[in-house]
Amino acid sequence: MIIARNPLLLRNRIKRMCCRFDGHKMKFYSLAQAVERMTMFYQRPGMTNEEYKKQFDALWDTVRQFGGSLGNHPVLINARAAEIAEENNTLKAAGAVGANDDDIAAATLDVENRMKACFMLGGARVTRGSVH
């Protein structure tokens, strides 16, 4: 069958080219799917808070295992690192122009944890009454 006349074959060919379906086990496509699942995940009716957290953490870890990060936001990290440097007086003490490596590492972890919390709260059930 001619590819130009079969949209499914064309789609599959485009996926292979763009997402690098090869010996790398579809890394780009797999990461994209993991990110999509993570961002679309929410606490369904009847799901306990404990089950929601367990599934949420598993999805978050899956994104990280594929090399992705939903918490890596350089502008936020740099701003937070500057705040941490100011709080710790590391700028004045070292006479540095910007935050040091420890401040940046702390800011990176802080921003990731805050983003993770935002995603978790965003997908949580609004009502906390009895489960139906």
Image (tube, rainbow, N blue to C red):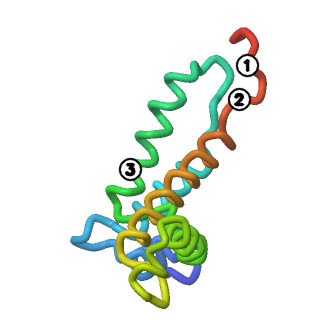
Does the CB distance between marks 2 and 3 fall below 8 Å?
no
Residue at 48% of width from left, 81% of height from top?
92
Q: Is 71 situated left or right of 130 in this image?
A: left
Residue 102: x %, y % from top left: 36, 69
Residue at (35%, 65%) from the top-left corner?
A: 67
- Vertical placement of 64 versus 15: above or below? above
Mark number, residue 128: 1
Circle 1 SS class: loop
Q: Nearer the viewer, residue 131 or 5?
A: 131
Q: Are marks 2 and 1 in contact (CB under 8 Å)?
A: yes
Residue 64 at x, y percent in the picture: 38, 57
Mark 2 or mark 3: whose residue is earlier in sequence: 3
Q: Horizontal placement of 48 versus 57: left or right?
A: right
Q: Is the residue marked by circle 3 packed among few (<14), some (14-19), or many (20+) residues within 10 Å?
A: some
Label 3 secondary element: helix
Q: Pick whichever of labels 1 and 3 is earlier in the sequence.
A: 3
Q: Residues within 10 Å of mark 1 (few under 14, many from 20)?
A: few
Q: Do tag 1 and tag 3 residues touch (Cβ < 8 Å)?
A: no
Q: Amino acid at mark 1?
A: Arg
Q: Residue furthest left?
A: 23
The numbered dot on residue 63 is none
Residue 78, percent from left and from top: 54, 76
Q: CA distance from mark 2 to mark 3?
A: 22 Å
Which residue bears the numbered disc 3?
A: 62
Give the residue at mark 2: 125
Residue shown at 43% from the left, 70% from the top: 103
- The residue at the point 39 percent across, 67 percent down is 105
Looking at numbered disc 3 in the image, what kind of residue is underneath it? Thr
Instruction: Give the distance between the C-alpha atoms of the residues marked 1 and 3, in whole angstroms.
Output: 28 Å
55 on left or right of 105: right
